[in-house]
Amino acid sequence: MTAMQDLLFVLGLGLFLLGLITGLVIPVLKNPRMGVSGHMVGMTNGPFLIVVGLLRKFAPGAAGDHRASAAEEKVVDLLLVTLAPVMVAATVLLIVGVLR
């Protein structure tokens, strides 16, 4: 297995285990629907990451022979850089909503 395959497999297992743990604490949460939502995310996306990690060796490179211009690469870089803070903000909002 390559490093990326190992990473996807381990993160998938971690997400799956977090989903299981979340399922155990649903009855004691103030808002059980949020707990069920987090549980379902872990239970569906964890195995998905595991399967993607296991099947990655059969998939060719994402770009293949395609080469992008410098401007196109910069647009993609900008979009990826802006995605990270949005994901962090969404996680913070989720945590604040669960703790209320």
Image (tube, helix red, strand yellow):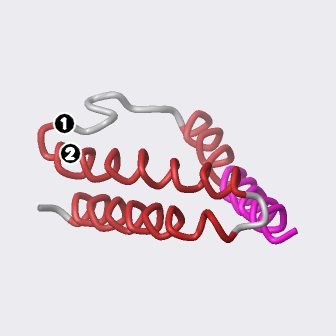
What residue is shown at x 53% (from left), y 66% (from top)?
A: 22
Q: Which secondary structure, mark 2? A: helix
Residue 13: quadrant of the picture: bottom left
Q: Which mark is residue 59?
A: 1
What residue is shown at x 24% (from left), y 52% (from top)?
A: 53
Q: Is residue 3 magenta?
A: no
In the depicted view, which residue is nearer to us: 18 or 80?
A: 18
Dominant SS in magenta: helix
Q: How far is disc 2 from disc 1 in space, using C-alphas?
A: 5 Å
In the image, residue 57 sits, relative to residue 59, either above or below, namely: below
Q: What residue type is labelled 2?
A: Arg
Q: Which residue lies furthest to the top in this view?
A: 66
Which residues, given as a range, are shown in magenta?
A: 82-100
In the depicted view, which residue is nearer to us: 31 or 51?
A: 31
Task: Answer left or right for 86 relative to 54.
Answer: right
Estimate how packed mark 1 is, as few (under 14), some (14 to 19) or many (20 or more) residues with alpha carbons within 10 Å. few
Task: Answer left or right for 7 relative to 88.
Answer: left
Which percent across, then down, holds residue 34?
Answer: 70, 54
Q: Residue 56 carries which label?
A: 2
What residue is shown at x 53% (from left), y 55% (from top)?
A: 39
